Image: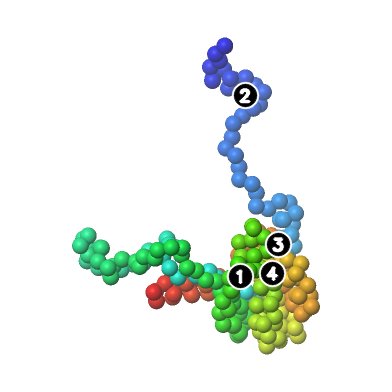
Amino acid sequence: MKVKPRTIGKYLRQENRLVFLARRKPWLGREGRKRRKRWCRERRNWKKEDFQKLFYTYEVRVQVSSGTGWRRKVLRKPGPEYAYKAENLPPTFIGEPISTRFWAAFSYGHHMPLIPLRKRGENERKSEKDRLGFDSKQYVHEILIPHLLPFYERCGGLDKEFETIEDGASYHISAYTRQYWLQYRFKKMDCPSHSSDLNPIEKVWAIFKGQYRRSV
């Protein structure tokens, strides 16, 4: 028996079965909103001196070959005879794009140099699914102890109760990393999940990438 779509719709409406566009899942549930409000209330009376007791840290990835989707601007005359001249074309690389990552930190009146993040070798692969990404042991023994700890002490972080701001990367919040944070008495700002990215080091990375692109 053939039934017209209009008839089907009529009976579905009678059963209160309506069609809607699926809504996006809310970023924050009730508990998340409460944590955000509590976090803001605790810091609503902060002054300049409070913000000067923060360490801002973050990583940046820089691609040093073509394939980023970014197109360099060139000054030339109009027309295809000028558009395809070698000096007006971006360099072409055959193979996978080459990229590197850096880590850095700064605070009020202090900053660190760029620290390159080492890519693990095949002999460090832990399983078949291991993509050789930066892990907790690398973060602790190649960043935290040799670089962040001296910087922290040089700025008087232990005495002035400095807080470090990091994102939620797995090697920042792992059990292995936490035990060293406790051992060296680091303090980390407890930011609610899905917080707005207010880390000013992001602006520094944007300037850094812009200067790098203009130099190549």
Q: Nearer the viewer, mark 1 or mark 2?
A: 1
Q: Residue furthest front?
A: 123
Residue identifier under label 3? 192
Q: In this rendering, does residue 70 appear at all?
A: no
Please, what secondary structure does the residue beneath circle 4 have? helix
Secondary structure beneath label 1: loop
Picture residue at 61% right of the left edge, 70% below the top: 120
The mark that comes first in sequence, 1 or 2, is 2
Instruction: Report if residue 162 is visible in the image.
Output: yes
Q: Nearer the viewer, mark 4 or mark 3?
A: 4
Q: Which percent across, then down, holds residue 191?
A: 70, 65
Task: Using the image, tell me which numbered label, if any, was put on residue 136.
Answer: 4
Q: Which residue is mark 1?
A: 120
Q: Is residue 85 rendered to the left or right of residue 21? A: left
Q: Residue at x 64, y 57 (%)?
A: 129
Kind of residue sitting beneath label 3: Pro
**Distance (Cα) linking label 3 and label 2:** 42 Å
Mark 1 and mark 3: Cα distance apart in space: 31 Å
Q: Are marks 1 and 3 in contact (CB under 8 Å)?
A: no
